[in-house]
Image: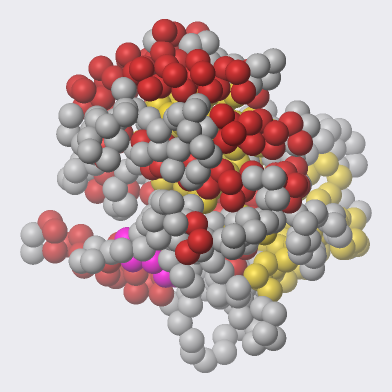
Amino acid sequence: MNRFMRNIVRVAAGLAAVALLVQPGAARADAAGSVTMDLGRASQGEIPRHFVGFSVEWSLIERYMGPKARPAFTRLLSNLGPGVLRIGGSSQDLVPFDPAAPNTNRVITLEDLAAIRATLNATGSSWGVVLGTAMAPPSQTRPFVGPDHARRFVRDGVAPAFADAERRIAGIELGNEPDLSYRDDLESYLGDLTTYSDASVTGPFPVIAPNTSEDILPWQDIDQRTVPTRYFWDWPRILDTNAAVMRERAGAFGAYASDHFYPLARTCVNRPYRCPSIGALLSDEHMASLDYQAYVHGQETARRGLGYRLEETNTAAGRGADGVSNVAASATYGLDLMFHAACPQPPNAPGANASCGTGSIGVNFHNAEVRAFFFPEEGNAYYNAINYDPSPAMGAPSAAPLYYATLLFGRLAQGGTGLRPVAVTPAPGEPADSAAAVKAWRVETGPVERRLFLINKGDRPATLTVSVPAAAAMVNRMTPYDPTGAGRTLDAPQVRVDGVQVGTDGAWPGFRPAYVPVRDHTMKITVAAGEAAVITARAETPS
């Protein structure tokens, strides 16, 4: 059997295994396990204050930040605490900047930049922005691309729009996914990266690169270098090209390199590993591929004094998959993804990052149109965390399931320290994999306050015995919600946090945690299928 066929067999077997997560069948007992909530202090594992974020295409500025959309969109951002809004994606290499053009979604205008500035202003001082500009080989679809265009964008657009607010700009992002636009011509990309990074083009603002994507492949194949990997292994050369410039021009958000990751793709002809399903999305296999990428690239950036940000990600490339990207499973996945990005666990070196010394400084979930740029009236991409109004009114955006994962993480984990993955062990007498679908993370959110996140990625409830060295605890929950009453869980169309939803005006009514007494330092908790529970407890004395 040749290597290709071995990979097909292995992938097919893996998909069959994860499919069991969502296959109907005879009723099964709850999963059972135990976990210990450590209330001590840890020296590493910081989750930066601006960790959460969204990515929006340039073609959708009017839909998210136009006059009628802006108030609700601003509230949706502010609900999360501090964050970073990235304006870019594939549209940044297709949409020219023209300060004299009438405002449409096919061109970047001064009105667009003013709308972004007004949105940030309305969040107070809590949000920054990445502004993507074109950097790609010129073509019939992008004849305007070149250093002069980038220079005009910065000089005639960004500089006047953000006068006296330069600190709000996390960076000027140079091109989108150059591994696709430059393809095998790495030398041309490196040459352009040097040119565009020069202060005469993008100064004085920070620059962000390489903004690369990778083919959706098993981490084992990447590690063994048995498959083409675009620019994955070229990161050292790319970073060495402009790391010094990035450090020199670092702004309020620090100097960092950016990366993209998608576990699945809407199209997967003859490539079963890419095929979207709830089981595949929630599988350990695909999360391990994220861990591998984030750890390898995170180490490379750290060696050069740079941060690492997962600046574009979501559930499936190609604008998501219906029934996978727009249901509760996307929130379950998204919450666990943010923890893994902050503290990747390299599958080729188990335990190497147990102290969370390597990790991303943030995550941006991407938002786009359902089919193609410049056709927002056709509707939202399936993976959107925030849905825009596709009607001519261009009114208030609304929260989709994935939004609630960023809300829970932004308000209950972001800014914390002492991040750690926590082992969940099977209950006595239970099979070794009985609680394997439950993922646990702990974080310190104050001198004596600790939080334990329990994320049930399985299709049945999990009852856990939690050792909590405290007298009482508070519990918040992110739960699938099926308005039809049919009892759908992972495939439910909506999500609630503490039984509450975000208002139509974007306002968040607030968390409503439940008080739970702890007897003999032990508590029982059942986490429903697709649900996440956050246990907050206080150490009796600071450690």
Dividing the image into 4 quarters, which one contains the C terminus?
top right
Q: Residue at x 83, y 49 (%)?
A: 537
Dividing the image into 4 quarters, which one contains the N terminus?
bottom left
Q: Residue at x 59, y 50 (%)?
A: 63
- Closer to us: 383 or 374: 374
- Closer to us: 237 or 390: 390
Q: Across the whole image, how many numbered discs are drawn on residues? A: 0
Q: At which x and y percent is residue 13?
A: 29, 70
* Relative vertical location of residue 295 with respect to residue 378 in this rendering, above or below: above
The quarter of the picture where residue 538 lies is top right
Q: Residue at x 33, y 66 (%)?
A: 275
Q: Indicate left or right for 523 with 101 as reference.
A: right
Q: Residue at x 19, y 43 (%)?
A: 228
Q: Where does the magenta region start and end?
A: 274-279
Q: Residue at the left extreme?
A: 1
Q: Residue at the bottom extreme?
A: 26
Q: Is 277 covered by the magenta stretch?
A: yes
Q: At which x and y percent is residue 14?
A: 33, 67
Q: Indicate left or right for 321 with 50 as reference.
A: left
* Relative vertical location of residue 336 with respect to residue 543 in this rendering, above or below: below
- Closer to us: 272 or 469: 272
Q: At which x and y percent is residue 507?
A: 80, 54
Q: Is 494 covered by the magenta stretch?
A: no
Q: Inspect this view and state whether residue 403 appears.
A: yes
Q: At which x and y percent is residue 386?
A: 61, 55
Q: Inspect this view and state whether residue 35 appears.
A: no
